């Protein structure tokens, strides 16, 4: 039997904690109906017997205290809420325990913003990690040594797992069920809980926020110029001349400050404007393409799919108010 420890951190979000427990314990119920023994022993593990969750709205009772768990097979870190730095500080006693359990062979999974607590252990250094796209800038700043892949719904780095934003934690739990219990029970779990088992990315949900949480004023001026004039053809040479910087220096500083190249930033600003048009207007693809400064239809469609994971028409059909209501 696989021992699963779902942590009960202070400031945890109830949904990912209880949802994970329900999905995993339901596997045992499926097996019981077949006369088979349970596969998982699922326990809530806390720093104290009672922990307040979701901003004080709920209280969770731990099955075991962390100090009493000598060995486990899988640690699940639920999403945390509120001030992330404060949440990490309040839950810092989990960190050495997670590290030791991993050394002893335990796998570790973080759900949504639980990635911040997992990254604090150092176990993600040099590895890929997913988290909520809204936390991208804060995560990159706090953990530059982690390879953040905000487009991914789940990552599996040889037994260290992570999931993307909010309810995408269900995709990771289904992935783990399939890994440990087999494809049949994974699909059955997805059907019973009415979940999409095959979602691979969260690109279509991302809203580009423009990384401005840095101290490079020249780069901020470049960002602001791009955002105000995205419909025009802007060149890197034009920006470097405007800022009295060499092209090489601008590109280096821009990448360091924003985690995007200048060209990538221009593309993301244009595609964010295109997304807003597809969501709220009845303009066709070519009209939106010209509006955001593209003249090459193939280049526009290729870039749009790269950034959103959908074609322009697929995106409009999915998110346009009138299309959805029709």
Image (spheres, grey):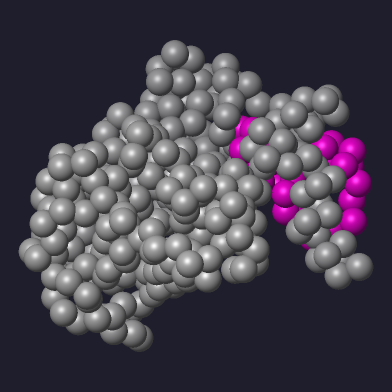
What secondary structure is the stretch in magenta mostly built from? helix
Q: Is residue 301 above or below residue 62?
A: above
Q: Is residue 317 left or right of residue 191?
A: right
Q: Position of residue 221 (x, y in %)?
A: 48, 37
Residue occupying the point 39% across, 63% down: 37
Residue 316: tell me if it is visible: yes
Q: Is residue 197 left or right of residue 154?
A: right
Q: Is residue 277 above or below residue 34?
A: above
Q: Position of residue 236 (x, y in %)?
A: 57, 20
Q: Is residue 260 left or right of residue 97?
A: right
Magenta residues (range): 266-291
Residue occupying the point 43% across, 48% down: 180
Query: Which of the pair 185/159 is nearer the observer?
Result: 185
Query: Which of the pair 119/273 is nearer the observer?
Result: 119
Q: Is residue 194 above or below residue 62?
A: above
Is residue 167 in the magenta section?
Answer: no
């Amino acid at each position: 039997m696989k021992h699963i420890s779902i942590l009960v951190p202070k400031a945890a979000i109830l949904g990912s904690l209880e949802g994970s427990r329900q999905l995993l314990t339901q596997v045992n119920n499926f097996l019981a109906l077949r006369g088979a023994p349970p596969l998982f022993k699922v326990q809530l593990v806390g720093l104290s017997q009672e922990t307040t969750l979701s901003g004080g709205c709920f209280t969770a009772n731990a099955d075991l205290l962390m100090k009493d768990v000598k060995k486990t097979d899988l640690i699940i870190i639920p999403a945390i809420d509120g001030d992330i730095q404060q949440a990490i500080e309040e839950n810092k006693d989990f960190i050495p325990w997670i590290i030791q359990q991993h050394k002893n062979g335990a796998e570790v999974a973080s759900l949504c913003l639980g990635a911040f607590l997992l990254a604090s252990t150092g176990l993600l250094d040099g590895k890929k990690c997913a988290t909520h796209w809204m936390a991208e800038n804060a995560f990159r700043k706090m953990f530059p040594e982690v390879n953040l892949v905000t487009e991914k719904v789940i990552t599996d780095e040889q037994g260290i797992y992570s999931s993307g934003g909010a309810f995408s934690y269900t995709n990771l739990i289904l992935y783990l069920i399939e890994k440990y219990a087999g494809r049949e029970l994974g699909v059955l779990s997805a059907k019973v809980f009415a979940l999409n088992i095959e979602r691979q990315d969260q690109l279509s949900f991302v809203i580009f926020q423009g990384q401005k949480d840095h101290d490079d004023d020249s780069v901020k001026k470049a960002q602001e110029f791009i955002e105000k004039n995205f419909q025009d053809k802007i060149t890197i040479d034009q920006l470097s001349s405007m800022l009295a910087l060499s092209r090489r220096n601008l590109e280096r500083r821009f990448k360091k400050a924003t985690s995007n190249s200048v060209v990538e930033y221009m593309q993301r600003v244009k595609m964010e404007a295109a997304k807003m048009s597809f969501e709220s207007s009845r303009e066709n693809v070519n009209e939106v393409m010209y509006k955001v400064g593209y003249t090459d239809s193939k280049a526009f469609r290729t870039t749009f799919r790269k950034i959103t994971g959908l074609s322009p028409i697929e995106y409009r059909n999915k998110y346009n108010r009138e299309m959805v209501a029709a």
